[in-house]
Each structure stands twice: as structure tokens, then as C-alpha cells.
Amino acid sequence: MDGRIHNFEETLDVRTSIDSSNIWSRDFWPMTSSMKRSVVITGGGTGIGAATAELFARTGHDVTITGRRSDVLATTAKRLGVTHTAFDASDPAAVQTALDQMPATIDVLVNNAGGNTDRRRPTVAAGDLAGVADAWRANFEANVLTTVLVTEALKPRLADGARIVTVGSVAAKQGSGSYGAAKAALEAWNVEIARTLGSRRITANVVAPGVTLDTEFFAGTVSEEWVAARVSAAFNRRPGTPNEIAEAIFFLCRPDSGHLTGQVIHVNGGAYAAR
């Protein structure tokens, strides 16, 4: 018992070695609620990305949205009053070039670019191993490479105390082939990013939506019956909305969410419950 108390007191000594007069100051926690933050959102032209951009813009922050389609980005940026830059986030050279159009300092990075590329590709024929390889590479590049390349490129610009949120998927836990595997890879990557950047008070988390409508994700490939069957697993018997996912992202980016890092937050109405 005495040993435990002694160790606890030693821990307190370490903690209080930080200048307690500064721990709640603006210099120690640069992202205070009253400050305008610089926010970058990939895949920000539609769906969850656009909803997240709207929420940050509405609350007074400087927002830059990115994506591959310049026309879609321009339309959304004009509607929201935010900045936009178009590039292919899976192309290292394109990401490097786009840095000239990105903020010099970034307080919030939301990695939303991606999607299930299988929904936009022809079905791979049985026995077509080259087709299988292409399909798996496509989902890896669209979901993993986009996130890793943009984060690595912007890492030197992240402010101390910054927030990184990556949009994952319940598919990482429930399957969906190469798409689910790609999203599972992001969960492992997120832990490493949270660990390596933690000393700078930077947090990194994943928000994993369940079935979410009013996005381009499904690309017209599912029926009402398909949606109903999956929504029936949710406790509230309904799909999610982009705004609900945006609110979860926004929460993780709050200045007072600094002790929440390396986590996967599921937003699915209970369809995938706590494990």
C-alpha cells in the first residue's frame, strides 16, 4: 500500500513539474474555443466532408476543402464561403504540388477522402486474379494512400495541440472485402500517428460511420431493401446522416477533447455496439 502511494506521489511530482500557471493558457493549449482555427478537410466537396466543412465554417473557422473534382469543390466552396484546392490525394506528386495552396499552419485535419471503389468498378470475374489485384489496389489507394500521403505532407504544418480525424467505416469490423480491409488498415495507422504525435499534444482518432445516406458513397448501387435490411440492425432503426457524422468529428476536434486519442468512435445507431 505504501509503495503504491509513494509511486502515485512520484507521478504527481512529474505532473506538477510542468508549470501549472501556464497549463491552461492560450500558449499551452493553442486551440481555445475563442480562437479561429485553420481546418483542412479532404473529400470536402460532398456528403460527410461537405457537412463537416459547413459546420466548421458556420462556427467561424478558416476552412480549406480538397478533392479530385474541381467543379464540385468550387460549387461547395462558394456555397459555404470556404477555400478549395483540387488534386488527387493518392498521387504523391499531386499532393506535393498542392502544398502551395494549403495553409501554412493547420489546427485541424479531417481525412475524409475515399470510398468503396468496388461500387464504381465492374464486378471482377471468377478466377481473374489480375482483376482482384486491381480492385484491392484501387481501394487501398483511395482510402489508405490518400490519408497517409496528405497527413505526411501536412505533418510539418500541424500546430501543437492540433486534431487529426480520419473517417473510417463500420466495414473495418464487419467486412466488405477490400474496402473493409482498407478501413481496418487506417485504424492501425491511426494508432501509430496518435502515438508518434502525442508528445506535441496532437490527437488522432477515427470516426467510423455505419450506413449513412445523402452521400455519393453507394453510387446508386443499393436498393431500398438492401438499406432496410442493414438499418434494421441499428437500435434506432434508421440510417445516419452526414450532419451526425460531422458533429462527431467536430467533437473530437474540440480543444477540450485532448485526452481522447488513438480511438475509433462508431456512429451507427448501435448497429455495431461496444466491444
Image (tube, grey):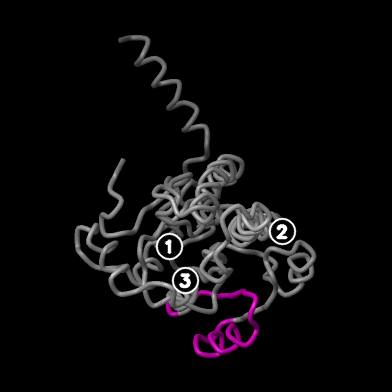
Q: Nearer the viewer, residue 265 or 171?
A: 171
How far apart are the two marked residues, 3 and 1, measured between alpha carbons? 18 Å
SS of the residue under disc 2: helix
How far apart are the two marked residues, 2 and 3, measured between alpha carbons? 26 Å
| Viewport quadrant of the C terminus | top left
Is residue 80 shown in magenta? Answer: yes
SS of the residue under disc 1: helix
Q: Is residue 101 above or below residue 265?
A: below
Say what amino acid the circle numbered 3 marks.
Phe
Q: Position of residue 19 (x, y in %)?
A: 52, 40
Q: With 237 as the anchor, is 192 left or right in this view? A: right
| Viewport quadrant of the N terminus | top left
Q: With 193 as the anchor, is 270 left or right in this view? A: left
Q: Position of residue 161 (x, y in %)?
A: 55, 53
Label placed on residue 217: 3
Say what amino acid the circle numbered 2 marks.
Ala
> Farthest top residue?
2
- Residue at position x 48%, y 46% in the image: 23
Q: Nearer the viewer, mark 3 or mark 1?
A: 3
The numbered mark, 2 or 3, whose residue comes first in the sequence reads 2
Say what amino acid the circle numbered 1 marks.
Ile
